[in-house]
Amino acid sequence: KNQVEQSPQSLIILEGKNCTLQCNYTVSPFSNLRWYKQDTGRGPVSLTIMTFSENTKSNGRYTATLDADTKQSSLHITASQLSDSASYICVVSAGTGGFKTIFGAGTRLFVKA
Amino acid sequence: GAGVSQSPSNKVTEKGKDVELRCDPISGHTALYWYRQRLGQGLEFLIYFQGNSAPDKSGLPSDRFSAERTGESVSTLTIQRTQQEDSAVYLCASSLAVAGGTGELFFGEGSRLTVL
């Protein structure tokens, strides 16, 4: 069964600190993995995309990693800001065209001053 | 339009009434998805349209839920005889789904449904 599991469910950190969110998946055939950010009351927005051959990709203060062997991904946020408070959703696409998408339940991040 | 547009943004209805939610995808996007998100929960897949192919309805929770899409444009999600458990935000997303594509989903802001 195709599944995406994220941890932790929620996380509270102080502004300026770093944090790492985890995503484990059992999706086959793997096409790509995306991290989305969902602000409260808004639709999710893509942060990064990882394909099978990529190990690390950065987007500003966000760095995503992918280990295709262990089927794990992480999202590292550096020097957190209050605006980073949101849900971070790991989404894995399956199939040759990546059309079937499986969503994780998300990690709710709270950044406090 | 520039992004995915959903309407209404908010809908309050009485139990037992029917509701229609509308989604205008990004022009040229062949794939369209509907998701449900209950308060504090993750996204729950409902239905997927891809071009002229038969839609993937595997996520629809009951026969009270149905969706249509006209070609590669507007989609409507209909919930008949609404129940309080239907209260949620209904999110629509579209993507440029081509072979070997990255499949990025572009989401609308959602329609918040409250069933009293």
Image: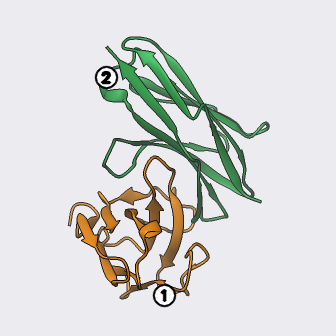
Chain colours: A green, B orange
Q: Nearer the viewer, residue B116 or A41?
A: B116
> Is the N terminus of chain A in the top left, top right, bottom left or bottom right quadrant?
bottom right
Q: Is residue B46 left or right of residue B24?
A: right
Q: Nearer the viewer, residue B105 or A1?
A: A1
Please, which chain is the residue tagged with disc 1 on?
B
Question: In x, y percent, where is residue A111?
Answer: 38, 22
Q: Is residue B94 left or right of residue A55?
A: left
Residue at the (72%, 54%) spot, across then down: A27
Residue corresponding to mark 1: B52
Question: In x, y percent, where is residue B30?
Answer: 42, 74
Please, which chain is the residue tagged with disc 2 on?
A
Q: Nearer the viewer, residue B111 or A76?
A: B111
> Is the C terminus of chain A in the top left, top right, bottom left or bottom right quadrant?
top left
Question: In x, y percent, where is residue B103?
Answer: 50, 59
Residue at the (31%, 81%) spot, across then down: B20
Q: Secondary structure at mark 2?
A: helix
Q: Residues at marks 2 and 1, common chain?
A: no
Q: For label 1, count other residues whose C-alpha is less than 10 Å away and answer few (under 14), some (14-19) or many (20+).
A: few
Residue corresponding to mark 2: A82
